[in-house]
Image (tube, grey):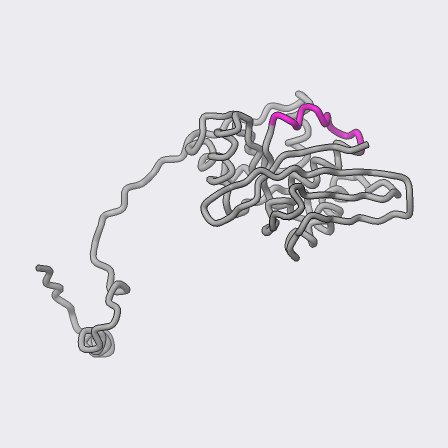
Amino acid sequence: MVALVRTVAYLGLEARGVEVQCSVAPGLPKFNIVGLADKAVGESKERVRAALSSMGLALPPKRITINLSPADLPKEGSHYDLPIALALLAAMGVTDAEQLGDWIAVGELALDARIVPSPGVLLAAIHAGAEEVGLICPKGQGAEARWASEVPVCAAPDLASLLNHLKGTQRLPDPEPGVVENQAVAADLKQVKGQETAKRALEIAAAGGHNLLPLFP
């Protein structure tokens, strides 16, 4: 059986769609991740294995292959943990594979099956809005994702509660949109570049504990 889960790859300030394909087939037990994955993604199988073990689930004694498609697109980061785990659970028959087709999933897994924040959820939310699908993300980033998009956002604290939510046995609360705080604009000394005389004056003032009186034209 092959199960599919959608996620994203981050390329600068752009998120591109990635399909996580999981195949569980007869053969010598092995867990492979292919599709131009970096070291952080390759280590995902150990985090997924430990997370499932903490939930009382064991990997089937079969040949498990995870393909991150398209294979020529570089995959970097730990946010692939959650979609890989969901694809594997769908292939094992633990969760509904068809239901996962309506979601994009991002998030790092802790060894105790908690879903912890990972960089880039804002880009993932914008991409989910463009694709008109929901977003599954860590609970700590739910407000950020909800602020960026009007699509459904499922912010889960751990893998077990996420599975229960998908099955309908538990209802995770909808995250509230985050509030953007306006910061006061003020001069910043780190903006002083070059100008050796000015930099020397700042060093002397800092060393002697003197005050500064900035004058702006």
Q: Is residue 101 magenta?
A: yes
Q: Is residue 214 above or below residue 205?
A: above
86 lies left or right of 29: left
2 lies left or right of 72: right
Q: Is residue 55 above or below residue 102?
A: below
11 lies left or right of 167: left
Assign the magenta stretch its main secondary structure.
Answer: loop
Q: Position of residue 207 (x, y in %)?
A: 24, 78
Out of 93 and 126, give the one closest to the viewer.
126
Out of 91 and 204, give the one closest to the viewer.
91
Farthest residue to the right: give it: 27
Q: Is residue 137 magenta?
A: no
Report the quarter where the N terminus lies.
Answer: top right
Out of 157 and 49, give the one closest to the viewer.
49
Which residue is pictured at 59% across the width and 51% down the height?
77
Report the quarter where the C terminus lies.
Answer: bottom left
Give the total of numbered labels: 0
Q: Position of residue 89 (x, y in %)?
A: 75, 35
Q: Which quadrant holds residue 17? A: top right
**Residues in magenta, as a range:** 92-102
